[in-house]
Amino acid sequence: MPEPKNFFIKTFGCQMNVYDSDKMKDIFLANNIQPTEDSFNADYIVLNTCHIREKATEKTFSDLGKIHKKGKKDQKVIVAGCVAQAEGELIQKRAPYVDLVIGPQSIQSLNTFLKKDDISKAAITEFDAIEKFDTLNLIKRNHNSKSAFVTIQEGCDKFCHFCVVPYTRGAEYSRSVYELVDEVKALVDLGVVEFTLLGQNVNAYHGADAAGQPHTLASLINTISEIGGVERITYSTSHPINMTDDLIQLHGSNDKLMPYLHLPVQSGSDNVLKLMNRKHTRDYYFEIIEKVRKAKPDIALSSDFIIGFPGETDQDFEDTLDLIQRVKYMNSYSFKYSPRPGTPAANKELISDEILDERLARTQALLNEQQMEYNKKFIQKTVQVLIDGAGKHEGQVKGKSEFNQSVALQGEKQIIGQIIPVQIKEVLTHSLLGERA
Ligand code: SAH
Ligand code: SF4
Ligand code: F3S
């Protein structure tokens, strides 16, 4: 008997890449290839790459260089994800030892590759979301955690001027309601209770049911919440202009929908929002937040901010700080603007690094302060925590509250996988400490 073959996947970027890596894992397992932690000695190594910021391409080549030098003889090297999509040809030219280059909507080609091992060396970067999911739907699922991501929508048609996603993930495509229901049921059978519905523009979802009728995200969430065994639902990432009233109202009426919303605004200045092609104003964002809070007063809000987009003046930046002060977030992510090749903003004049650093530091200080304030209100209160693993310290377990907070507590490993009430005792910078209530 020959030794069974094994694989290693390194995942960068967003949750949608995590989902795709899970699917590639399923493909390997279906071909009887087992996971290993030893990347350089794996028979197959996959880099599932992200192109969203900074020197993503250079980072990929430097990783590939290391693999080429240290990887075992005959190791098959696969580059997937958004750098593969954007720079497929360059990868083949500069790293000819790479065996397969597959874009995010072509990961199903991995199956053909494993079966034949001789498919064309051309980069496979077609945008074919239908074929992707049709093929993946047939592959047996494996999952050993209580939470799962489910990609319900691919691509994006918004074309914000800073963003590569419409180019790396293609046009918006919504999966059908019935195939998603099947996927959720299969995951429930594997023990999953918490579902995060994913899309780069998830609230623009418009998938059809069996009769061909389009559904909204709100009606999809209602359908999924009725599946026995589903306890928690969240969705990410939403665009403010697709925050429709039915979705907002659902936060007040569907108990399985978690009181947490990630709603990126990117900037608090109307001038910058316009330059970014975000298609909404600052007041429009405030209106949405007000409606959401009316439907669900204790909802936890988070956002993404891009600091120093070309053309951002001191006053524009102050407007962003002012928006943060007014909204009050539970946590948020902020990034220095990074010019991306091929996007409309790519060649605009950049703001100096010094100014960027200062603005980013002020933004992050304010966001951290808000996170602390938000979390402090939970001291002595009880939250419901889905325990998902061992904590950092001996005898500790950790998990996520319904408000998406990280919570650690003393507890036996046997409670991993359960949702338990936890009384909060102490607030740390990015997590909470509690006791079982
Ligand atoms: N679809 C989501 C986000 C996609 S990318 C949305 O519409 O909000 C995730 C985050 O990366 C973005 O919210 C943005 O804050 C950040 N980002 C995207 N392009 C960037 C760039 N060129 N420079 C810096 N940050 C960027
Ligand atoms: Fe990128 Fe804008 Fe689409 Fe989000 S909405 S993925 S930021 S283009
Ligand atoms: Fe990165 Fe692609 Fe996601 S660029 S953020 S992995 S969609």
Image: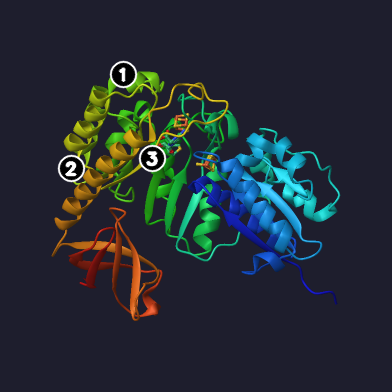
* Three-letter residue code for mark 3: Phe
Which labelled disc corresponds to residue 335? Answer: 3
Q: Position of residue 126 (x, y in %)?
A: 70, 33
Q: Does ligand 1 reach within 8 Å of label 3's beta carbon?
A: yes
- Quadrant position of the N terminus in the picture: bottom right
Q: Is residue 326 left or right of residue 414?
A: left
Secondary structure category for the residue under label 1: helix
- Residue 47 location (% of width, % of height): 63, 52
The local secondary structure at tag 3 comes to: strand
Which of the two discs, 1 and 3, labels the residue nearer the N terminus? 1
Q: Which mark is residue 297?
A: 2
Q: Residue drawn at (55%, 44%), measured in percent from left and top?
A: 50
- Disc number placed over residue 271 in the picture, else none: 1
Q: Is residue 136 above or below residue 216?
A: below
1 or 2: tag closer to the N-terminus: 1
Find out whether the residues at labels 3 and 2 contact each other: C-beta distance under 8 Å. Answer: no
- Confirm or deny contact between disc 1 and disc 2 (CB under 8 A): no
Q: Residue at x 74, y 39 (%)?
A: 124
Q: Earlier in the sequence, mark 3 or mark 2?
A: 2
Compared across the picture, whether 93 is left or right of 274 comes to right
Query: In which quarter of the view is residue 91 placed?
Result: top right
> Closest to the observer: 240 or 183?
240
Q: Is residue 385 left or right of residue 424?
A: right
Q: In terms of depth relative to the viewer, which is nearer, 188 or 344? A: 344
How far is mark 1 from mark 3, CA to CA? 19 Å
